[in-house]
Image (cartoon, helix red, strand yellow):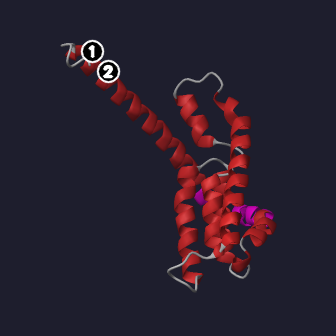
Amino acid sequence: MLFFHGNLENLNKSIFASTNDAIKLSIELLGTMCLWNGIMQIANKTTIIDKLTNLLMPIIKILFPEMRKNKQIQKEISMNMIANILGLGNAATPLGLKAMKSMQKENEKKDTLSNSMLVFIVLNTASIQIIPTTVIAIRNSLGSKNPTAIVFGVWIATICAAITRNYSSYDINKKK
């Protein structure tokens, strides 16, 4: 509208202000992503991931019974789950892709997703989080006075999403 009213100066100011804000936000998010990706890489080279994997193992064995014998896939699934629990969606994505690739190697029907792959997709879609790190970083970068105020709401939302997603995938499998 500013263009049609001959107010190009305000249009240019608003374009450059928006671009500046977008770049600032991108750099802050990139810093957060790099930090947590680094922490996950360090954790992977220590016994922390093994300990967390052992902690998650009862859940992983229930959710992924086809993967009981493959410790490497269990570790990859565990790392993805840990990244999601910490709210590190951007760090969880490459870890999830790696786990899916490993599960596909074990999959007998290459043109069909295995049950474990479907469960893994549902878990990632629900993105169960205890600490929504990325959202907190965004809120902080935008000047929120209390960026962590959304934690309880995120817990409720992720639990509801997990229940809904699991119920809907149960219905789909039941009909087949």
User: Residue 99, can we see it?
Assistant: yes
Q: Position of residue 163 (x, y in %)?
A: 73, 53
Q: Which residue is mark 2?
A: 14
Q: Which residues are magenta?
A: 40-55
User: Residue 46, can we see it?
Assistant: no
Residue 48 colored in magenta in the image: yes
**Side of 21 relative to 47 (left or right):** left
Q: Is residue 131 above or below residue 164?
A: above
Q: How many marks?
A: 2
Q: Position of residue 117 (x, y in %)?
A: 61, 71
* Residue type highlighted by circle 1: Asn
Q: Secondary structure at mark 2?
A: helix
Q: Position of residue 12 (x, y in %)?
A: 25, 21
CA neighbours of label 1 inside 10 A, class few (<14), some (14 to 19), many (20+):
few
The one of 31 and 109 positioned closer to us in this rendering:
109
Q: Position of residue 7 (x, y in %)?
A: 22, 13
The CA distance from mark 2 to mark 1 is 6 Å
- The quarter holding residue 59 reads bottom right
Q: Which residue is mark 1?
A: 10
- Residue, x 18% and y 13% (percent of image)? 6
**Side of 24 relative to 47 (left or right):** left
- Residue, x 26% and y 19% (percent of image)? 1
- The quarter holding residue 100 reads bottom right
- Residue, x 77% and y 63% (percent of image)? 56
Residue 175 colored in magenta in the image: no
Contact check, label 2 and label 1, Cβ < 8 Å: yes
